[in-house]
Image (tube, rainbow, N blue to C red):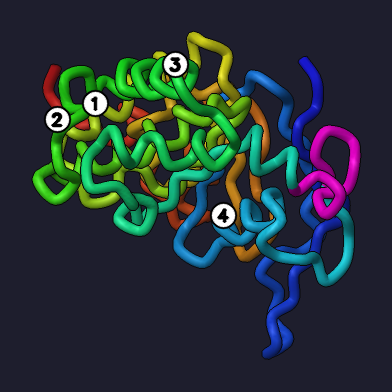
Amino acid sequence: MSELFRASALRHRFPDGTFGLNEVNLSIEEGEFVIIAGRNGAGKSLLMRHFVGLSAPTSGKVFYRGASVAERIPLIRKEVGYVFQDTEAQIFGQTVREDLAFGPANLGVKGAELERSIDAALHDAHMDGMADRRPPTLSGGEKRRLAMAGVLAMRPRCIILDEPFANLDFPSIHDILSVLSTLRAEGVTLVVLTHEIEKVMALASRLIILDAGRIAFDALPREAPKSIFTASGLVCPYRECYPWQID
C-alpha cells in the first residue's frame, strides 16, 4: 500500500483561541477502510477539510501523495470524492442521470465514456433502473446513495463520507452498508466520519477516535477498549455492553 494522506503536528486554532485540532499526527494508506469517530465538535469534519484543502493549518503540515495538499489540489479534486452530510447540497440535476453526468463532464469526460461512467456509478450505488427518476421523488436514503453515485461517477481513488447514516431508517442504512461493502471489495480507500460506529465497525480495517481535537485512539477496531468509547462520548459498539439483549 502507498500513503495517501498524512498530517504532521497539525493544529487548527479558531479566532477565539481554542483548538479544533491539536498536534494531530496520522497517515492513511491507499486501500484502507478507516472510521474517524468522535462526539460532535471532536474535529472529524475539520480534519477532512484540511485533507482536501478546504482549510489551512494554523501550524503543522498536511500531505497528499507525498506533497503538500496546497500543491495537490487538482489531483485531490480528481482522485478524492467527498459525500457531505447534507446530501441535498450535492444534487444538481433534474434527473438522476443528469446529476451523475455533472461531475465527470466537468472533468472532460464525454460521449460513450461518460455513459459508461454513469451506468457503472448507478450499479455500484445499487441504483440500477433509477436513471430517469427526479431527485425530489427519492427517499432520504436514495438521495444519499445518489450523492455517493455522483462521487463514484468521477472514479475516485478515495471516498470520504461525513455521517452517512444520519437520519436514515434501517433499510436505508442497510443499503449504504451494502454499497460500502462493494467499494471495499473493489479496493477503494474509504474514510467514514461518524459517531455511529456500531453500524460500520465490522467493515472497517482501522478506527481513529478524536476527542477535543486530539487523537484518543488509533488501531484495529477490535483492539479498542470499552472505556475509550464512554470517555470519548461514544456508544460502546460491543455486544457485551448490552447484557440484557436476548439472542
User: Which mark is nearer the camera, 3 or 1?
Assistant: 3
Q: Quadrant of the C terminus?
A: top left
> Is 227 part of what is drawn in magenta?
no
Position of residue 71 in the picture relative to residue 150 (left or right): right
The residue segment tinted magenta is 63-73
Point out which mark residue 183 bears. Answer: none
Residue at image point 39% right, 48% down? 163
What residue would you read off at disc 3? 112
Q: Which mark is residue 175?
A: 1
Task: Find the distance from the CA under tag 3 to the CA under tag 1.
Answer: 28 Å
Residue 231 horizontal/vertical position (percent): 52, 55
Apparent side of residue 234 relative to residue 38 in the rendered image (left or right): left
Residue 186 showing in the rendered view: yes
Above or below, 118 relative to 35: above
What is the three-letter code of the residue carrying label 3? Ala
Name the residue type under label 2: Pro
Provide the secondary structure element on which disc 4 rests: helix
Query: Which of label 4 and label 3 is nearer to you?
Result: 3
Q: What amino acid is labelled 4 in the image?
A: Lys
| Number of the label disc, if any, that sits on residue 44 | 4
